[in-house]
Image (cartoon, rainbow, N blue to C red):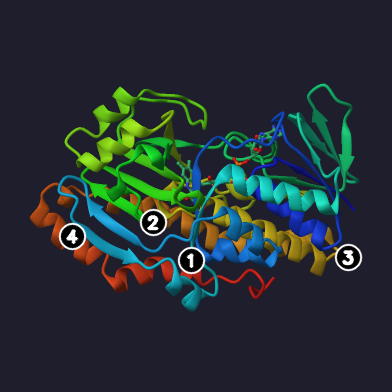
Amino acid sequence: MRICIVGGGLGGLTAALALLQQGFKVTVYEQAKELKELGAGVQLGPNAVGVLYRLGLETQMQEIATDTQGKKVRLWNTGQSWPLFDLGRLSVAMYGFPYLTVHRADLQRVLAQKIQTLDPNCIVLNSKVLCIEQTQEMVKIKIDGQEAIECDLLIGADGVHSVIRKALFGHDEARQSGIMAWRGVIDCKNLPPHMHEMVATNWVGPGAHVVQYPLRRGELMNFVGAIEGNRWEIESWSEQGTTEECLGDFKGWHEDIHTLIKAIHTPYKWVLKVRDPMPSWTKGSITLLGDACHPMLPFLAQGAGMALEDAYILARALKKYKHSLPLALGRYEHARIERTSRVVDGSNANAKRFHNPALADATGASEYVSKEWSEERVKERYEWLFRYNVEEVEI
Ligand SMILES: Cc1cc2nc3c(=O)[nH]c(=O)nc-3n(C[C@H](O)[C@H](O)[C@H](O)COP(=O)(O)OP(=O)(O)OC[C@H]3O[C@@H](n4cnc5c(N)ncnc54)[C@H](O)[C@@H]3O)c2cc1C
């Protein structure tokens, strides 16, 4: 079977690796001229780390990731703090795998290196897919400036603006979430010593929140600041903003937040859009994975995790049902739709929780945080996510 993947992001590369390990021949077409993720971190819950470890990347992950010692919630103005959950020891003890934070570029590099040991020609860069055509016998892919390519299975892993999804299902109905976000990476050398803590922090406030966590064993700090508003239009990884604009959005917030913002090398901004979960994402010999089929708000920190899980389960389904592609794709989709839809909905719900008006003053906030982030509520929200086992789930 000739398998092509469109998109060499975290989902596409994980799918390529999982498929190569299952003995398939696969080619990834990526539009970028080089594999260079825009600087930003990604949090990987034990469910996502489990996928990478099962693909033989445990040593590499330990080299590039930060095993944060815990996660806390802090209040936007006073800085009061509450424990959220223990990411380190407890994660391994409870779920079998750690909760790690990693620079996206590092993860993309280790995935690509592992793929290249199995097939040095698997990843084809500088290949922007323009359109596709499907017949009974095969799928034809038209790549900018190249001859058309034919394959038996096409996997669209081309992210939130997926060309493949549009070709199969038409334009999506994206709605403004009413939330914009800032992202940036900070060199920890530019932060005072009390801000070098190896913990992840969710700062919560009325109408906004900030997530910060260390990367590269504490060399860098990742910053994501989400605020309510509709000033921007562009949903993009590469739209730059200014420090002044970002500071203005967090006026009145704790001085640690201002210190972080001033230390961001380049602040990037983008608008967050909401899309309803898709009822189906396969047509004939074409299927989708990751943000191409279930883009979500980043408020459960699970978008990449879902792409990784999709990739692993898809490879398992193709191996198990290799006599029947429709069956394999049907089983893959069946195994994934309910869970990913639940994560999309849960991420939307967290937006309301993080920005609740009750957080405006310290007394109301204390009561609200103690209730919403009680051990029991946190368990309810995360337990089912973290416990998922890609090897055991029925397909
Ligand atoms: C601010 C923010 C913070 C986040 N934090 C987290 C987090 O902490 N944890 C987490 O799990 N998730 C997080 N996410 C979500 C996560 O980044 C995405 O869900 C994940 O990157 C999806 O992976 P993907 O491979 O599906 O798509 P992408 O990473 O978008 O990759 C798509 C790839 O396809 C390529 N491509 C696109 N079109 C074409 C084409 N026509 N031809 C060829 N190639 C093409 C692109 O160049 C890209 O390389 C966050 C997202 C945001 C916005």
Q: Can residue 280 be seen in this view?
A: yes
Q: Is residue 207 visible?
A: no
Instruction: Indicate the quadrant where residue 126 lies.
Output: top right
Tell me which residue sits at (40%, 50%) in the image.
213
Amino acid bearing label 4: Tyr
Secondary structure under the numbered disc 3 in the rendered image: loop
Residue 41 position (above or below residue 174): below
Mark 2 and mark 3: Cα distance apart in space:
49 Å
- What percent of the width, then of the height, locates residue 49? 57, 62
Q: Residues within 10 Å of mark 1 (few under 14, many from 20)?
A: many
Amino acid bearing label 3: His
Secondary structure under the numbered disc 1 in the rendered image: helix
Q: Residue 368 got which mark?
A: 4
The reply to whether the residue tagged 1 has its Cβ within 8 angstroms of ligand 1 is no
Tell me which residue sits at (65%, 43%) in the image.
9
Secondary structure under the numbered disc 4 in the rendered image: helix
Secondary structure under the numbered disc 2 in the rendered image: loop
Amino acid bearing label 1: Leu
Q: Residue 198 got which mark?
A: 2
- For label 1, the residue is 385
Between discs 1 and 4, the one toward the N terminus: 4
Tell me which residue sits at (76%, 33%) in the image.
125
Between discs 4 and 3, the one toward the N terminus: 3
Between discs 2 and 3, the one toward the N terminus: 2
- What percent of the width, then of the height, locates residue 232? 38, 25
The reply to whether the residue tagged 4 has its Cβ within 8 angstroms of ligand 1 is no
| Quadrant for the C terminus in the image | bottom right
Instruction: Indicate the quadrant where residue 380 lies.
Output: bottom left
The reply to whether the residue tagged 2 has its Cβ within 8 angstroms of ligand 1 is no
Mark 4 and mark 3: Cα distance apart in space:
54 Å
Between discs 4 and 2, the one toward the N terminus: 2
